[in-house]
Image (tube, grey):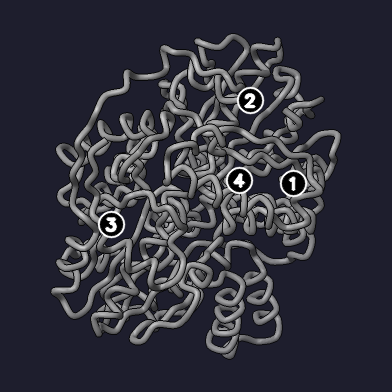
Amino acid sequence: MEFLKQPPRFLFFTGKGGVGKTSIACATAIQLADDGKRVLLVSTDPASNVGQVFGVTIGNQITAITQVERLSALEIDPQAAAQLYRDRIVAPVRGLLPETVVNSIEEQLSGACTTEIAAFDEFTSLLTDTALHADFDHIIFDTAPTGHTIRLLQLPGAWSNFIEAGKGDASCLGPLAGLVKQQAQYKAAVEALANPLHTRMVLVSRAQNATLQEVARTCQELAAIGISQHYLVINGLLPQTETLQDDLAKALYAREQAALSAMPLILKKLPCDHLSLKPFNLVGLEALRQLLTENVPSQLLERDQPITFNAPALSSLVDEIAADSHGLIMFMGKGGVGKTTLAAAVAVELANRGLPTHLTTTDPAAHLTETLRGTVENLIVSRIDPEKETQRYREQVLETKGAQLDAEGFALLQEDLRSPCTEEIAVFQAFSCIIREADKKFVVIDTAPTGHTLLLLDATGAYHREVSRQKGSTGLHEATPMMQLQDPKQTRVLIVTLAETTPVLEALNLQADLRRAGIEPWGWIINNSIAAARELRSPLLKQRAQNEVKEIETVAHHHATRYAVIPLMKQEPVGKESLRHLIISQASAPL
């Protein structure tokens, strides 16, 4: 493997959701540990599944993976990190300041930006802690999907610049003086990230046009913040030997090879590794040890047997949704499961039935326009763009609250609005405005990958308090966005997953998190199912299909109130006609 040649201390694995970052990061950690290196595997994904991959509970502390000598793991838990951060800020003043003042500080520290900076503190400490570096030869980062990761990697410079320019009080993070103490750590983190002798960025992709285009953008964005040593891994390639008698395999192989040929030039210049699609699920040590090799031990395979498979098509869910004249439809799930495609397909179908529909996304790495490839009558398409929303929010606050301030107060307000966490407030405000449209039309939302979305939902109360602080006592509705999301008459949440062990477990965890927030998922969609395809001949695809059936049955009988299964298509579902075909495709096939 090119990316494993003379590896530096820090290895980052990033890319679009669902491309296999976690599996490759785990396999890399195991291989380095087997080679005698002391390795710490860190997940910065709020929806981490590293523990599930290894079959152990990890959490927000360094935990030894007992099955692998010299390997430890850590899952940065944003909520736990935020509580520790609050305790650290509030404890020194409790008992010294009036209770009303302490309560005010705690209120200010309840925002989502506090959660972000707390998790960020943990991240930067891993890059700068010399004592930790003495214990480990390599620290491997399994990151959140691309958009969230770029945000995280930009933060060292953003917060360092904010502290340097600041003269006032970073109210949502506690006293600015507390942040100044961290300035040296942030600067050291910037230097570590930019040093190719210390840091290597492994860009993981699948052989898909949209995914490769996103990786190219990531490469450019990383270079812009000084991270220049990039390696490319193309994961899950179908071997040509599987195409001999299988039309689906032939179509998939041709699609992958065409995507590789059209790969952006910036990626063609990078050191590159190709990993073949495996016939087994990448869960457990034995499977992970085979990921970076071409060997497939027989014990990981199941006996070939005929299967008859039937499941509801997506049309059954759309018919039920369309029975109402309006409502909020949210597609949620782990990155890479096809939320964008399915959200677009449902929106196009509702619009084609003459129902006014607004399709939007909260995903920083959105691909709605590439998926639709054209306009549709009765359909409005938008994107919550963080940069535009932040600028709009700053201008709004300065025009309203700023108009009542003197010159000094106005300058302090401007400084406060330069805080990186202002973006989070602005995005939430835009999200709140769009979902109110569901009173009059269908609003279909393609959400960011699970972890980022849950942080947004968990923080609704905190966001409202922060917006109220910025705008004053006016401008907030009595009915909060969370109340709308909790009302099954107004909102339908569709969980999208794949028919594989880890994605189903992740979807089940998402369902549990939603229920704790008082949101009951309306249905599940199992996307890109090989088991639902027709006339399979490829041994590899047939093996994966057999593995899928067990997962589909589990979802159908134990997890979902209602569900649908979408077959894996020969052609990528792009354009309104292909998207409409997803609605009616019947998941039924004898294997």
| Dot 2 alpha-carbon crowd within 10 angstroms: few under 14, some 14 to 19, many 20 or more | many
Left or right: residue 337 compared with residue 241: left
In this orientation, which residue lies closer to the viewer: 586 or 359?
586
Q: What mark, if any, has residue 28 been given in the picture?
A: 2
In this orientation, which residue lies closer to the viewer: 402 or 15?
15
Left or right: residue 407 compared with residue 63: right
Going by the numbered disc 1, the residue's amino acid type is Tyr
Going by the numbered disc 4, the residue's amino acid type is Ser
Pair 2/4: label in front:
4
Locate the C terminus and report the quarter of the image it occupies: top left
Residue 545 placement (x, y as % from top left)? 33, 34
Going by the numbered disc 3, the residue's amino acid type is Leu
Q: Mark 3: which secondary structure?
A: strand
Who comes first in sequence, dot 3 or dot 1?
1
Pair 3/1: label in front:
3
Q: CA distance from mark 2 to mark 1?
A: 27 Å
**Total numbered labels:** 4
Disc 1 marks which residue? Answer: 186
